[in-house]
Image (cartoon, rainbow, N blue to C red):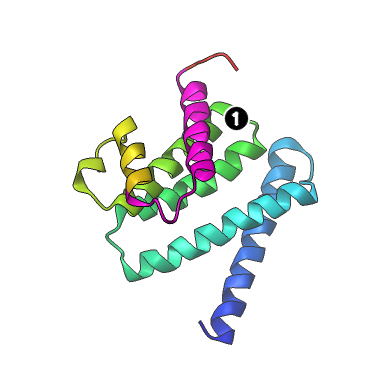
Amino acid sequence: MNYVEVKICKEEINNLIKYIEDYAIKSKGSTIDNKTKDFYRVISKQIIFFKKVLNAYPKTYFIKVIISDFLSLILNDIKLETRYYYLNQRSIIENYMRLILKDDQYVTHITRQSFLDLKQKNQSNLSEKEYTKIMNEYKIACSYIHGGIH
């Protein structure tokens, strides 16, 4: 990436944050605190990154879904739509796994075996603590989606 491309990315992130701030004011009548804005900025960087990947690989459906889910996750967070927030979070985890595992058997659904395969195939890059955190977040998301007690 050259200087101009970096500048364009920063501008795109700032525009997205501005859109999100305006959306928060319109939808709930209040501004976003700096901690939340920083969280949204991290997600915005992921969106920009995946948009770049999508330009190189336009037929990668999972990337399109991740981009959509990240944006929806932010909007659902602003609107305090917890169940939909977790639906997007679960979808993001599943589609990241599909991208990492690169196996046709995971195209239609993610199972417990998918997580075990993720752990086994990425032992050198994925600590037990990170794996446990992913599993825990996935379980929490599934619980919200399927109506568990919270």
Residue positioned most to the left: 104
Extent of the magenta region: 121-146
Up-down relation of residue 139 to residue 24 (above or below): above
| Relative depth, front residue between 107 and 127 | 127
Name the secondary structure under disc 1: loop
| Relative depth, front residue between 34 and 100 | 100
Q: Tell me if residue 111 can be seen.
A: no
Specify the quadrant of the image occupied by residue 106.
top left
Specify the quadrant of the image occupied by residue 5.
bottom right
Name the residue located 65 percent from the left edge and 51 percent from the top edge: 40
Name the residue located 30 percent from the left edge and 57 percent from the top edge: 60
Q: Is residue 128 magenta?
A: yes
Name the residue located 50 percent from the left edge and 81 percent from the top edge: 1
Q: Is residue 8 left or right of residue 21?
A: left
Q: Where residue 17 sits: x, y (%)? A: 67, 57
What's the magenta bit mostly, secondary-structure-wise?
Answer: helix
Name the residue located 57 percent from the left edge and 61 percent from the top edge: 45
Look at label 1 and name its amino acid.
Answer: Glu
Q: Where residue 75 sits: x, y (%)? A: 59, 42
Q: Tell me if residue 148 can be seen.
A: yes
**Within 10 Å of the Cα at label 1, are there few (<14), some (14-19), or many (20+) other Cα atoms?**
few
Up-down relation of residue 112 to residue 48 (above or below): above
Q: In this view, does 106 lie to the left or right of 81?
A: left
Specify the quadrant of the image occupied by residue 15.
bottom right
Q: Where residue 38 sits: x, y (%)? A: 71, 54
How many numbered circles are shown? 1
| Relative depth, front residue between 57 and 117 | 117
According to the image, label 1 marks what residue? 81
Q: Does the magenta stretch include residue 109?
A: no
Quarter of the figure with the C terminus: top right
